[in-house]
Each structure stands twice: as structure tokens, then as C-alpha cells.
Image (spheres, rainbow, N blue to C red):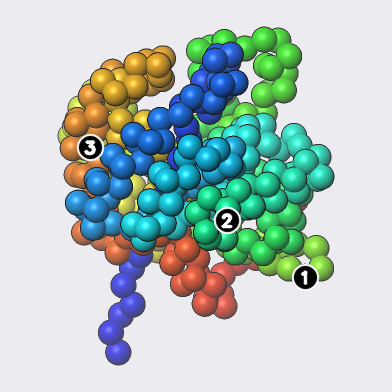
Amino acid sequence: MSTPPRIASVSLDLDNLWSYLKIHGDGDWSSRPSYLDTFVPYVLALLERLDLKITFFVVGADAAAPENRAALRSIVAAGHEIGNHSYEHEPWLHTYTPQQLSDEIRRTDEAIREACGVDPVGFRGPGFSWCPALLEVLAERGHRFDASTLPTFLGPIARAYYFRTARLTPEERELRAGLFGEFADGLRPNRPYRWSLAGGRRLLEIPVTTIPGFRTPFHFSYLAWLAKFSEPLMALYLNIAILGCRATGTQPSFLLHPLDVIGGDQLQQLAFFPGMDVPSARKVELLERVLGTLRRHWTLVPMGEHARRLEADPGLPVRQAA
């Protein structure tokens, strides 16, 4: 018998221009400025050139806007998967009431179905935000997997940097006090598992993979940041991550964001964001190198395919959602 191929999933959180402005505390977000009509064709052309299918996590408010429908439908037409990324893209989603969470997921599912003609089966919280009540809602609505957890010790550091650079009122700082998790999140599992929920239900969790042992992130935003200082350093860091995943049998979930592939030469409004001084062509060059390296070790698939294979594993660990 042949050995089943090792796989890794690739996803992109389709955060729009307005969502970055909103998180930064810029009041201009309320008019919901969008770059989807230019970014989506740009990234689809890149993925076609790489012969790569991935999962796009789409924000409900964008799916509900008629002007975005052509761009979003083109994602499905190109053979990619659509996931739910919440309706309002608020990284303080974990502070919502159960009813607010239910409304948030339902509205996004419905907007994606109307805009794209598909039912999302996976979810990722904005800013890796999640809570046990959210998991219950996802299971109730028939989602097959959650992909919101980031098992890293660096959450408090990311939060401190965010508070130092964002323009927030005291009320907004209080609301966002728990953003990006706590130090203890680094103790969470780095490999997929099943959540045990009310009524005997189960929900698959596919964490955003961090480096085994060190628990530092290696999704592309971090790699591109390292490359600003030294490409050999980026390559070394990536190879350490690969060696750690191979040694522990971890099949990675590799995360992308729009600003990983588009630079300040195309998006002057987001000059405040780290890495936006790097031209788009340079980011694409780095991403192609990174994905090429990952492909030497794993077959790259959308998250739905990753979930399908994991669901067939009867030995997957089970954790209580608390």
C-alpha cells in the first residue's frame, strides 16, 4: 500500500480595508471602504499561477454588500473554498453574548450563501477571537470545523504593540483589553483535536500552527517581517518550523492575510500597518519562495480537505470546551 500524502492547509483571512481601519481606531471605517474589487483578481491570478487552491475566510458585511458580489463569486468560480470570518470583524467577539454570537454567525452564513452560492462549513474568528459559547453556535449551525485558536505565548506582546499604535478611546481600550489572548494560550494544543460540546456534539478544531516547542507563529506575516532584516534568517526560521512540524507529526495550517501580498505601493491608506513599506512585487516573491518550500514537504490543500481527512481519524484527541 502507498503511504497517504502528508498535507498542509492554506487559508487567507479576507480582511477588507475598512476592517483594518476599524481595528486601528480610524473613524473612516464606517463608510466601509473596500479594496476587494482590485485585491481579489490580484490574489486569484497569483494562486492560479501557483496552481494552488485555498480557503478564503470572508467577512459577512462584505458578502452582504452588492458591490462585492462579483469579486466574491469569482473566488468560488476559481475553485477555492469560502469560510465564515464573522459579520463585523471585531476581534473582541469573545465578549459577545450567546445571542449576539448566534446572530453574528447566522447573518454571515446567510450573506455568504446569497453572495457566493455556497454554505460555509468552517469558521475563523477575527484576531483569533473565540469562546466556548461560540463553539456551541458553530456546532448548532452545522459548521464542520473551527480554525480560531493560535497556540502562542506572544498574545500579550501583540496586544501591547496594538495599544501603542492604535488610536483608541479609553472605552475602546477597555472593550479590547483581552485582544489576542493570554500567555497561557501557548499551552493549548498545536495539533488538531475535537471539542466536546453540549449534548454529546463534537466540533473539529484546526489551530493556526505555531512552531512546536517554541510556540512562536510562522504564518506568512511573521516570515515577511523577518525577511526585512535578513532573507537567510527568514529561511532558517521557516526551516525550524518545518523540522518541528515533521518531528511532531504536525500537519500545518498556514495562514495568509491580504497585506501579506499587497504593499503600500497599492494601498497608501494602510501605511501605518507593519510591512506596508515593502512593495507588492517583493511580497509576492517571498510568498512564492515560502509556499515552494512548504510544498517540498506537504501537499497544500484548502482547509475543508484538511478537515475531511482529520474527521476520518478516530484517534483524534477530544477536549472540553471551557
Furthest toward the front, the residue is 66
Up-down: is 154 above or below 208?
above
Up-down: is 295 above or below 215?
below
Q: Percent from the top left, x then y, of residue 87? A: 63, 40
Residue named by callout 1: 200
Name the amino acid, label 2.
Arg
Helix or strand or loop: what does disc 3 sit on? helix
Instruction: Give the residue displayed 71% in from the left and 38% down from the top.
Output: 94
Name the amino acid, label 1.
Gly
Q: Which mark is residue 113?
A: 2
Instruction: Give the residue displayed 28% in from the left and 57% down from the top.
Output: 52
Up-down: is 167 above or below 59?
above
> Which one is closest to the eye, mark 3 or mark 2?
2
Instruction: Give the residue displayed 50% in from the left and 65% down from the top.
Output: 307
- Label 1 CA crowd tier, 10 Å (few <14, some 14–19, many 20+): few
Q: Percent from the top left, x then y, of residue 176? A: 67, 24
Answer yes or no: do the residues labelled 3 and 2 have beta carbons within 8 Å? no
- Label 2 CA crowd tier, 10 Å (few <14, some 14–19, many 20+): some
Q: Earlier in the sequence, mark 3 or mark 1?
A: 1
> Which one is closest to the eye, mark 3 or mark 1?
3
Residue 83 is at least partly visible in this image: yes
Up-down: is 299 above or below 172?
below
Residue named by callout 3: 284
Name the amino acid, label 3.
Val
Residue 189 is at least partly visible in this image: no
The residues tagged by marks 1 and 2 sit, at their Cα atoms, a distance apart of 28 Å
Helix or strand or loop: what does disc 2 sit on? helix
Q: Percent from the top left, x then y, of residue 223? A: 31, 35
Q: Which mark is residue 144?
A: none
The residues tagged by marks 3 and 1 sit, at their Cα atoms, a distance apart of 45 Å
Helix or strand or loop: what does disc 1 sit on? helix
